[in-house]
Image (spheres, helix red, strand yellow):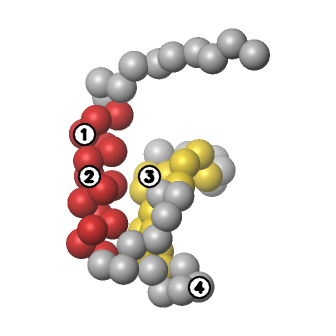
Amino acid sequence: MKFVLFRDAKTEYRWRMVAANGNVVATSGEGYKNKKDCLSTLESIRKAAADAPVSEEEP
């Protein structure tokens, strides 16, 4: 699993999480004007993910 930082068509920074098989499993969902802001959000997600609870929604 790895995170990939890139610039979109609007030249905003985004990230995606890519599995070992190349499939994208998560994205930033929004663009960031500053690379620093994008990396800061990404780092926050990396730290919080290990302790994030799993919940299930019923149809």
Between discs 2 and 4, the one toward the N terminus? 4
From the image, tell me which residue sits under label 3. Answer: 2
Whether residues under marks 1 and 2 lie with C-beta atoms below 8 angstroms apart, the answer is yes
Pointer 2: residues within 10 angstroms few (<14), some, or many (20+)?
few
Between discs 3 and 2, the one toward the N terminus? 3
Q: Is residue 9 above or below residue 23?
A: below
Q: Quadrant of residue 32?
A: bottom left
From the image, tell me which residue sits under label 1. Answer: 47
Q: How far apart are the two marked residues, 1 and 2, measured between alpha carbons?
A: 6 Å
Q: Is residue 34 above or below residue 55?
A: below
Q: How far apart are the two marked residues, 3 and 4, measured between alpha carbons?
A: 22 Å
Quarter of the C terminus within the rendering: top right
Q: How far apart are the two marked residues, 4 and 1, measured between alpha carbons?
A: 29 Å
Between discs 3 and 1, the one toward the N terminus? 3
| Residue 43 circle label | 2
From the image, tell me which residue sits under label 4. Answer: 9
Residue lying at 29% horizontally and 64% vertically, measured from the top left? 39
The three-letter amino acid code for the residue at tag 1 is Lys
Left or right of 37 in this view: 55 = right
Q: Is residue 26 above or below residue 10?
A: above
